[in-house]
Amino acid sequence: MTTLTNYRPTTRLRVVERTEAPAAIFTTADLNVWYGDTHALKNIDLTIFQNEVTAIIGPSGCGKSTYLKTLNRMVETNPAVRISGSAQFKEMDLLNATVERLRSEVGMVFQKPNPFPKSIYDNVAYGPKLHGIRKKAMLDEIVENSLKKAALWDEVKDRLSASAFGLSGGQQQRLCIARSLAIEPSVLLMDEPTSALDPVSTNKVEELIGELKKDVSIVIVTHNMQQAARISDRTAFFLHGEVVEYDRTEVIFERPSSRLTDDYVNGRFG
């Protein structure tokens, strides 16, 4: 049994070797985040690649969600937060970019579906309207295309004016995905997006993620080891605010270099 209390990684994360790596979408170097005196992220060096699904795994409190929220600056809503190091989004200095510009390219889907108290149509049209689109024909096209991308159009096309709260939990989560897609982001950040869903709805969202990565890079935080193994291209294992190991998903689950990674993915702790 692995003892976690005194664990500190002895080596930096291992570099993935690949002849032609895809372009980077996020790069963080020596990234540290504190909540007051709590050191939540410690020297995070991580590159996330375009048009891939990157899973972030690890036990509760390991820094997974903090890292995800740092990527779209939501972490800064906590007044006690302090950040050091560097983070790039494409060619943009992420930590010094305007939040509005960043979030126009980085969508977020949360653990529990959070549709607005509006119609299905208005939920999806909300973002484009904020960006100045007013023509109904254009909004109609965006709403239809976004709902199709989220695999929801056929289920709701005859009730677009109905309240979003009338949808099932799984449909509400796909609506939230459609709402994020409506602004044509480069990235979708997903924080435990299926943990509140039933198995059938979870399967639909997982299938959707597989389709979306053709056009959008996806970073997903998940406690579900089987889900990470099924849907991700790369996996990062976080522990105590540090990256223990980062590699192709099949390496992490089948032949990890760290004993801690092996113990975690095989259920020996966590």
Image (tube, rainbow, N blue to C red):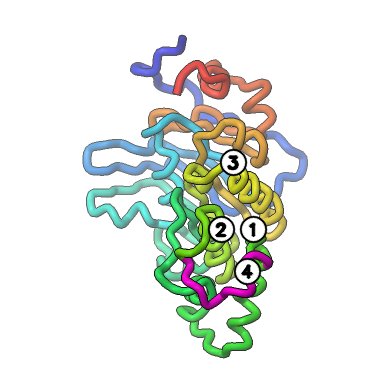
Which residue bears the numbered disc 2? Answer: 171
Which residue sits at x=65%, y=80%? 141
Give the extent of the magenta segment: 154-164
Verify CB contact (< 8 Å) between mark 1 and mark 2.
no
Magenta stretch, main secondary structure, is: loop
The residue wearing badge 3 is 199
Q: Residues within 10 Å of mark 2 (few under 14, many from 20)?
A: many
Amino acid on which the number 2 mark rests in the picture:
Gln
Query: In the rendered image, which residue does mark 1 sit on?
Result: 216
Asked whether, in this view, residue 156 is left or right of residue 95, the answer is right
Q: Tell me the kind of residue under disc 1.
A: Val
Instruction: Give the foreground label among 2 and 4.
Output: 2
Q: Position of residue 207 (x, y in %)?
A: 68, 49
Give the mark nearer the N terminus: 1 vs 4. 4
Name the N-terminal-most of marks 1 and 2.
2
Residue type at mark 3: give it: Pro
How far apart marks 2 and 3 lie (CA) works out to: 13 Å
Residue at (30, 42) in percent of width and height: 34
Q: Earlier in the sequence, mark 3 or mark 4?
A: 4
The magenta stretch spans residue 86:
no
Q: From what the image shows, is residue 36 above or below residue 91?
A: above
Q: Residues within 10 Å of mark 4 (few under 14, many from 20)?
A: many
Give the quarter of the image for residue 247: top right
